[in-house]
Amino acid sequence: MIRALGALCLAVALVVAFAAPAAAHNVTAGADLRIAQTIAGTELTVVIKGTARVPGPLRIGVVAFDPVAGLPVNLEVRSLTDGRRVTALARAAAQPQYAQLRVEETGPHELRLRAGNEVAVVPFRVLVERGSAGDFLIYGGLLVAALLLVGGLLTGVLTGASARRGPAMLLAGGAAVGVTVAAMVIVFEPLLPPGEPDGAAPTAGLEGGRPFVQSRVDTVPARPAAGEEFTLRLDLVDGSTGRPVDDLVAHHEALAHLVVTSEDGRYFRHLHPLRTAPGRLEVRLRADRPGRYLAHAELERQDSGGQLLAGEFGVEGDAAGPGTVDRPASPRLRPAVPVAGRPTTIEVATQGATRPWLGMSGHLIIRSQDGSFLGHVHEMGSSGPGLRFTFSFPRAGRYLAWAQHATDSRIVTTPLTIDVTDPPR
């Protein structure tokens, strides 16, 4: 019996000792990967369905959030391990029809996405759950218990009553140990950290995360003119090595969220630039008036926290006429006069039924009037119509804000202006 208890303790200790570390951030086998892309003048989200087995099928769909239903999107998946390529054609729609490709192995892959005359290259990993040490102990313990029970029964039948007691007791004790080991593993395995899936990236082992990203913001051409299309380019480099940063992970369903505003706030775009090369993000724009423009990018590196990058560029040309400018809406504020450093609830009316976009039902982007501050919060999940946000303004002053939500046919942007006071003394 002492030996049996020793074996049980050893088995449990082995499960704990050899359990694999927790899976890395943003790496989950079987989960869908959603990546927003601003491409061909519209807003799309690419959905790469989770893979159950390899070799096996890989399903990819394209969700449209602007009125571009039926836009053809060419897909090419390439394994970075052996270079094998497969292609398919998908069409963007509010409810996508998934194109089916075939993958032969787990690990790093690239999705080359072509829409119109633009191309994006999205890195991703094919992940498949692998069996754990716990599974081995569960099924092994039950198998051993079954074999020992059968052995005990046969011993009782084939030997006499006086001779069978010792061996039968020994076999029964062994069967009990096997069942106990399996039961203990079943109970305690959910409490252990999950093992990494097959195909996951090796653990970086960087204490404190990776260095911050440094960025350079350029335009092509270098002096864009108002009313003409140009490319806004972000080159990302590691703050320690100076090498291109190519380890961005999906952060709220995008590799990067780019907010571009004119200095006066009359121009606003919330974009998701394309990865066109390692460390390079690009998006095509058209500014309607000359002046100074601000660019803020939210992104996250693997095994590290989020980061906000800022830059600016200029647009040349003659001043445009007054044109048509959306008048700021009047949100419901609680308190009615926001106080710096204290939470404010902001409620905004919606146009039509909402659907999730970037994993949320609504977004609120807030910029100080001088452009030195940018904040981004999400809808709180209000039970009634409209969007509800909570935000603490850092200091007194005037803030420009834009509430966004998606409907079945488009993304709706509602501009806001909010004045914030100092707390009473």
Image (spheres, rainbow, N blue to C red):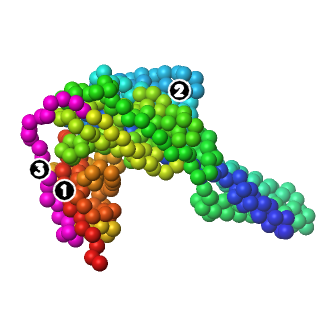
Magenta stretch: dominant SS?
loop
Whether residue 354 sits left or right of residue 50 in the image: it is: left
Q: Secondary structure at mark 3?
A: loop
Is tag 2's residue or tag 3's residue first in the polypeptide sequence?
2
Residue found at x 30% / y 21%: 117
Q: Which residue is mark 2?
A: 79
Q: Is residue 386 visible?
A: no
Question: Label 1 amino acid?
Answer: Thr
Residue found at x 30% / y 46%: 357
Q: Secondary structure at mark 2?
A: strand
**Residue pushed farthest bottom?**
425
Disc 2 vs disc 3: which is toward the camera? 3
Question: Label 2 amino acid?
Answer: Ser
Q: Position of residue 333 (x, y in %)?
A: 20, 66
Q: Position of residue 256 (x, y in %)?
A: 39, 41
Q: Is residue 222 visible?
A: yes
> Does the magenta run of residues contain 195?
no
Q: Label 1 crowding class (10 Å Cα cut-off): few <14, some 14-19, many 20+?
A: some
Question: Label 3 amino acid?
Answer: Arg
> Does the magenta run of residues contain 331?
yes
**Residue pushed farthest right?**
163
Is tag 1's residue or tag 3's residue first in the polypeptide sequence?
3
Whether residue 213 sits left or right of residue 67 in the image: it is: right
Q: Image quarter for residue 344?
A: bottom left
Which stretch is magenta?
A: 315-337
Which mark is drawn over residue 327?
3
Q: Position of residue 296 (x, y in %)?
A: 35, 44
- Quarter holding the N terminus is bottom right
Q: Relative to 259, does residue 38 appear above or below in the rendering?
A: above
Closest to the observer, 25 or 51: 25
